[in-house]
Amino acid sequence: MTVRLPDLALAEALIPVVLAAGRATLAVRARGAAVMEKADKSPDTEADQRAEAMIVSAIKAEVPDWAIVAEEAASAGELPDVLTEYFWLIDPLDGTKEFIKGGTDFTVNIGLIHEDEPVLGLVYAPARSRLFYGCVGDGAFEATVNGLSVSKARPLRVATAKLDGLNVVASKSHRDDATNEYLSKKAVGNLVSAGSSLKFCLIATGEADLYPRFGPTCEWDTAAGHAVVRAAGGRVTCTDGKPFLYAKRSEDFLNPGFVVFGDPQLQL
């Protein structure tokens, strides 16, 4: 087995493939992406498939001994026989509905799990030219992408919340009654709707304090953003306050509801 441990250098080594995958998604959309339907009725495009193939290939070249769970492969029933101590969760195009309709809130995601928790993540929003990445213990960062170049990354830290006027981010496409009921009990000063794992990143940058999600997600939807939030000093819990953990293979990698907090003083 590989002796390499996750660190910021590993995250930085994967930046080129995240950017390449993002460019590929934009190229597919520019020429018109045919939309297919998965077994679970969710949409799929060539962009999802191309980006995933690129990312999987790059990860295997970088750390060949760690298992990979990737959304497109998993949807086709292709899963590793064993989850290694460290394993990857890949969502090549989170926010496919937003992507299809020409929006900007879609992302390319790579997350690394250790002992049921995300420890490293990269999230790239190609239509917004925003790149977020981090490793727990080494910090979180954001860089702006301009063509093939990347700006000097700035460190990220969650914000100190104004408890009498919270900045909240919530799902653009999956808002439900449970979310609205939860927020009705909070002192919400500003509510922004956003799509994909970008919502996690807005917590990491300090642009938002709170992100509740009661609807269904899968582990590859959340791992990368969760890692960036942890690296920036935030946390994620289940909606009952229990730890939000990964490697739920017996449940097809389905997540329970969760809440993302920036400021440590925030509670359910």
Image (cartoon, helix red, strand yellow):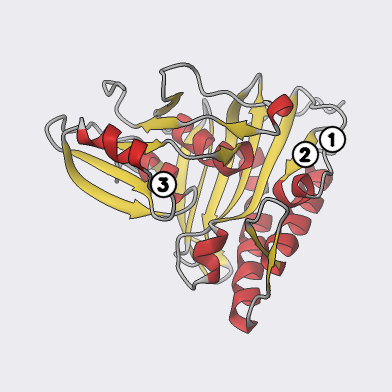
**Residue that carries the numbered disc 2 in the rendered image:** 68
Name the residue at the top extreme: 242
The secondary structure type at the circle numbered 2 is strand
- Count up the numbered dots: 3
Which disc number belongs to residue 262? none
- Taking the spot 23% from the left edge, 42% from the top edge, the residue there is 167
If you read the primary sequence from the N terminus, does the residue marked by circle 3 or circle 2 appear first?
2
Report the Cα–Cα distance between label 1 and label 3: 29 Å
Name the residue at the bottom extreme: 31
**Residue that carries the numbered disc 1 in the rendered image:** 80
- Tell me the amino acid under the disc marked 1: Pro
Residue 29 lies in quadrant? bottom right
* Discs 3, 2 touching: Cβ within 8 Å: no
- Tell me the amino acid under the disc marked 3: Lys
Report the Cα–Cα distance between label 3 and label 2: 24 Å
Q: Position of residue 250 (x, y in %)?
A: 73, 25
Labels 1, 2: front one:
1
**Residue that carries the numbered disc 3 in the rendered image:** 199
Q: Position of residue 224 (x, y in %)?
A: 57, 40
Q: Compared to 48, does 70 lie above or below?
A: above
* Discs 1, 2 touching: Cβ within 8 Å: yes
| Residue in front for this viewpoint, 68 or 143 | 68
Q: Compared to 99, does 239 lie above or below?
A: above
| Residue in front for this viewpoint, 145 or 170 | 170
Report the Cα–Cα distance between label 1 and label 2: 7 Å
User: Considering the image in quadrants, where does the N terminus appear?
Assistant: top right
The secondary structure type at the circle numbered 3 is helix
